[in-house]
Amino acid sequence: MKVLLITPSYHAGVVEAAGSWPNLGLVYLAGHLRAAGHEVVIYDAMTKGHDLAQIKARIEQERPRVVGTTSYTASAPAASQVLQVAKAVDPSILTVFGGIHANFMYEEMLKDWPWVDVVVRGEGEETLPELLDSWPDEKKLAQVKGIAWRNQRGEIIVNPARPFLPDLDRLIPAWDLVDWEDYTFYVLPGSRLGLVNSSRGCPHQCAFCSQQKFWQQSYRERSAESFVSELEHLKQTYGVNVVMLSDEYPTRNRERWEKILDLLLERQVGMYLLLETCVSDVLRDRDILDKYRAAGVIHVYVGVEATDQASLDQFKKSITCEQGREALALLNEANIISECSFVLGTPEETPEHIDQTLELAKHYNPDFAHFLLLAPWPYADLYPELKPFIIEQDYSKYNFVEPVIKPRQMEAEELAQAVLKCYKEYYLERIETYPAIRDRFKREYMLRSLQVMINNSFLRRHMQREGPLPAAMQKALELLESGI
């Protein structure tokens, strides 16, 4: 069959503000489908900025037998529209929906979106080829693990779950199907940005997190050799020089992680790495943070989430406030860009607590601080506690920047304005320190990041309403233009 895999065109001006990168899930699905004999096209409508009319035209052009898409919760409505358009083009097209939202909300999706034929739950690399081999024979479909579907009587059938892949080194990425010219990291002009994973899963139990739920708190890792070889392939074949790790927890196994760093240095891969890890691993690795930087790790996000212990305990973060502050300080000392987020907007949120969070965020002193509004995933551990306070049912608003929960003591608009105030005050103070950063690479990185934030992020429309840029921001941008 000919299969068209589409990334839906969803935009919120949050993570995507930093750059554009391939949909890694579709790259793996394409590789396994092609190995099973299918013809596959990857179409990233999101990065191309295509609307539904353009998506429809592309489906008409490709004339696929199958259209598949994937989403997280906020992009689920946009992904649904993609499959609705596919059915409008040709009702006989098999429409398949996967991803983290689909993994949990399959019954709701199959009930409310009749244009969705099949939902893939969990990992799809083995499930999707088997599904295509079985369609539309209902007896065969009933044997495919990891799917939910409707039979000819319209009944929703939920098949048993499929076990996770035992060996991640055997994954088959179809990197040659990627339109590489579309992908770049805006902070580093002329860069080509890839997305790769070295592991899957996380054993932690953070109450607001969807990832630990999806992976059922399991953890699997690729070998250091397999991962570094893939980075070499991307660099040498496609010119990829910046890679973002999609791992939830790449550094869990210190022995493996240090071997990865050693191989990167030994083979002189020459690539910049951006990754996320946990506070405890930064503290554990304080003696090798210089090796992180030498191997190309330039930007690390750590899961701090809150500046008070009560919130950390509520979120089931197994760290203390002091540990979070220490981890960020260690990264800063190693000239690694530090980033973290602070979750606001719980039912008990108050203006006073937000002001306190802002002041403590300044004390934490990350290079990048994000003040994110709590998104109540309908499948997260916190959901029952949050449900009475939800004021927004539109999943597309569950993007960390639009109020979905109304606190007892605050209005939604008041909450939104308080978050904007946090960003403004935090960065106006940070900007004053940029010219004094001694490390030239980090200084230019921070200045360019400011430019990217102003031009691309969700903050742009709010700043435009307030008129000219603050003098400190304008001065920093002039410094960047002068080449200092």
Image (cartoon, rainbow, N blue to C red):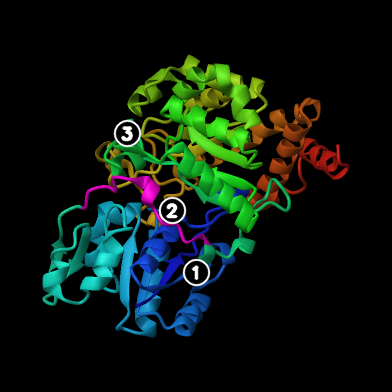
Among the 4 quarters of the image, the one containing residue 394 = bottom left
Residue type at mark 1 is Tyr
The label shown at residue 397 is: 2
Whether residue 289 sits left or right of residue 92 in the image: it is: right
User: Residue 43 appears at what percent x and percent y?
Assistant: 49, 69
The part of the chain drawn in magenta is 162-175
Q: Nearer the viewer, mark 1 or mark 2?
A: 1
- Mark 3 near mark 1, Cβ–Cβ under 8 Å? no
* Secondary structure mostly seen in the magenta stretch: loop
- Mark 1 near mark 2, Cβ–Cβ under 8 Å? no
Q: Which residue is mark 1?
A: 43
Depth check, front residue: 47 or 131: 131
Q: Nearer the viewer, mark 3 or mark 1?
A: 1
Q: CA distance from mark 3 to mark 2?
A: 20 Å
Compared with 61, 357 (above or below) is above
Q: CA distance from mark 1 to mark 2?
A: 24 Å
Q: Residues within 10 Å of mark 3 (few under 14, many from 20)?
A: some
Tell me which residue sits at (32%, 32%) in the image.
Answer: 203
Residue type at mark 3 is Ala
Q: Is residue 391 visible?
A: yes
Compared with 222, 116 (above or below) is below
Q: Earlier in the sequence, mark 1 or mark 2?
A: 1
Q: Which residue is mark 3?
A: 207
Q: Earlier in the sequence, mark 3 or mark 1?
A: 1
Q: Residues within 10 Å of mark 2 (few under 14, many from 20)?
A: some
Q: Earlier in the sequence, mark 3 or mark 2?
A: 3
Among the 4 quarters of the image, the one containing residue 337 = top right
Q: Is residue 320 magenta?
A: no
Q: Residues within 10 Å of mark 1 (few under 14, many from 20)?
A: many
User: Residue 409 appears at what percent x and percent y?
Assistant: 40, 33
Tell me which residue sits at (13%, 77%) in the image.
Answer: 152
- Mark 3 near mark 2, Cβ–Cβ under 8 Å? no
